[in-house]
Image (cartoon, coloured by chain):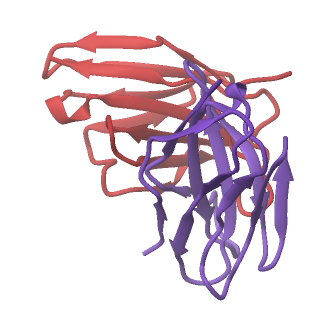
Chain colours: A red, B purple
């Protein structure tokens, strides 16, 4: 069964450093998403991506964040200068379509980011 | 804006007990509603969904009914198993046209089932 994969599973970094979180969505999916979950809090939407551009982004997704689909299979989230409050579990998701209520978003296992 | 409220966890039940996890939502328009489950060390998996009022989603013995009048989507199972131990997330997605629609999640409810 096709699945979304994410690497690494755990990333530890120093405050101020850049990190890139990687995701491989399901191959025929067209819509891609990043979410994050700070420990003990809700899963929060960060950004959605379609046709090589951002469709929607949340208030969290400020200038420190960027997304890219560099090669047609990977989907990356870059945090330019990490802060302590960026420590969270980051989930990538993909879906075949975007707007219809019935289309499922398939999630990866997550990358745990720890900023020291 | 849209929001989802779930009952606090953890919920601890004995095997074969009845499960209810409450979920209520606030949304404009006619959202779709989902329950996702996260088993230890894994990603979020869709458990069931309902796309309009009075729809009942069901899967693996779990059920939830989209109640517009009470803005609720409570998850139920008649007889839980140890293998159901996981974190359960209620979520909504706004309806209508537009570009990719985000999911809005509740905080998640951890279920622990013991023998």
Residue B41 vertical position relative to residue A51 in the rendered view, above or below: above
- Residue B13 horizontal/vertical position (percent): 58, 39
In front of the other: B59 or B12: B12
What's the residue at 68%, 83% (across, down)?
B68
Res B81 → quadrant: top right
- Residue A13 horizontal/vertical position (percent): 23, 13
- Residue B96 horizontal/vertical position (percent): 70, 76
- Taking the image as drawn, is residue A51 in sight? no
What's the residue at 62%, 70% (across, down)?
B94
In front of the other: A90 or B91: B91
Res A25 → quadrant: top right
Does B66 sit left or right of A74 as displayed? right
- Residue A56 horizontal/vertical position (percent): 50, 57
Does B95 sit left or right of A110 as displayed? right
Total marks in image: 0
Does A42 sit left or right of A59 as displayed? right
Res B113 → quadrant: top right
In front of the other: B29 or B9: B9
* Quadrant location of the N terminus of chain B in the rendered image: bottom left
Return the residue found at the far bottom. B69
What's the residue at 64%, 63% (across, down)?
B74
- Taking the image as drawn, is residue B114 in sight? yes
In front of the other: B89 or B17: B17
């Amino acid at each position: 069964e096709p699945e979304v994969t994410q690497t690494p599973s755990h990333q530890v970094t120093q405050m101020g450093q850049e990190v890139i979180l990687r995701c491989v969505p399901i191959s025929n999916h067209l819509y891609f998403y990043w979410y994050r979950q700070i420990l003990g809090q809700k899963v929060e939407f960060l950004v959605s991506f379609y046709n090589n551009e951002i469709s929607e982004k949340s208030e969290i997704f400020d200038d420190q964040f960027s997304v890219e689909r560099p090669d047609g299979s990977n989907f990356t989230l870059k945090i330019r200068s990490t802060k302590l409050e960026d420590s969270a579990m980051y989930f990538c998701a993909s879906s075949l379509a975007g707007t219809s209520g019935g289309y499922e978003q398939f999630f990866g296992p997550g990358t745990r980011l720890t900023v020291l | 804006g849209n929001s989802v409220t779930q009952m606090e966890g953890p919920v601890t039940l004995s095997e074969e007990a009845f499960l209810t996890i409450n979920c209520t939502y606030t949304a404009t328009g006619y959202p779709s509603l989902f329950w996702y489950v996260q088993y230890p060390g894994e990603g979020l998996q869709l458990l069931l969904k309902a796309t309009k009022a009075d729809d009942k989603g069901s899967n693996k013995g779990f059920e939830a009914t989209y109640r517009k009048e009470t803005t609720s989507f409570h998850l139920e199972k008649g007889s839980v198993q140890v293998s159901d131990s996981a974190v359960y997330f209620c979520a909504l997605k706004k309806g209508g046209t537009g570009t990719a629609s985000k999911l809005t999640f509740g905080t998640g409810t951890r279920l622990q089932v013991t023998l």
